Amino acid sequence: MRTVLVTGPGGAGRTTVAAATALAAARRGERALLLTADREDPTPRLFDGEEPPGLDVVRADFRTELLALQDRAGAALELLGAGRLDAEELTELPGAEQLALLKAVREAAAGGHDLVVVDMPPVHQSIAVLALPGQLRRYLRRLLPPERQAARSL
């Protein structure tokens, strides 16, 4: 599987370039995935309302991810006496869109596509998104060093 990240300044046509790249691969007979974090579904405006054969379009969305998590953890939430959140009352938390995009990229890696084209945010945000897993690992290692974890388990 190949992964192509498309980034650039807002309004420069990066979604169009990403869609055209995925579409060209699908027309060559490859199984292609266009992954975007756009708030609107890009399918109608880019493909005249229908997805060509061999092309999947996935929109990484914080609300959808959180609602799915609530469904998977329903029993635990009920046990804790927690009420469910409705989609209409969810507001996007800072960084949530980036986390949803990273999760979607990780899931796409196991999806069996020949090509995954990711419509990334502008360059400075893309760099921060791609650095996020490494930064979180570094923070966790500093907060919970392996020696302390081993001593605590004994």
Image: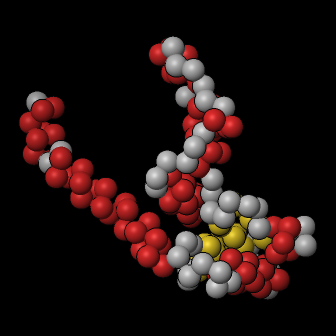
- Residue 103, x across and y down, in percent: 53, 55
Specify how the rendered protein is coloured.
secondary structure
Count of numbered marks:
0
Is there any visible trace of residue 72 in the rendered image?
A: no
With respect to residue 21, does 56 lie above or below? Answer: above
At 56% from the left edge and 82% from the top edge, which residue is drawn? Answer: 9
Kindly indicate the quadrant of the structure image that contains residue 84: top right
Kindly indicate the quadrant of the structure image that contains residue 120: bottom right
With respect to residue 151, does 43 lie above or below? Answer: below
- Residue 3, x across and y down, in percent: 57, 76
Kindly indicate the quadrant of the structure image that contains residue 41: bottom right
- Residue 104, x across and y down, in percent: 58, 58
**In this picture, residue 95 sits left or right of residue 41:** left
At 47% from the left edge and 72% from the top edge, which residue is drawn? Answer: 126
**In this picture, residue 117 sits left or right of residue 19:** left
At 16% from the left edge and 40% from the top edge, which residue is drawn? Answer: 149
Q: Nearer the viewer, residue 52 or 11?
A: 11
Q: Nearer the viewer, residue 56 or 30?
A: 56
Is there any visible trace of residue 107 in the rendered image?
A: yes
At 68% from the left edge and 77% from the top edge, which residue is drawn? Answer: 15
Which quarter shows the N terminus? bottom right
- Residue 69, x across and y down, in percent: 57, 37
Which quarter shows the C terminus? top left
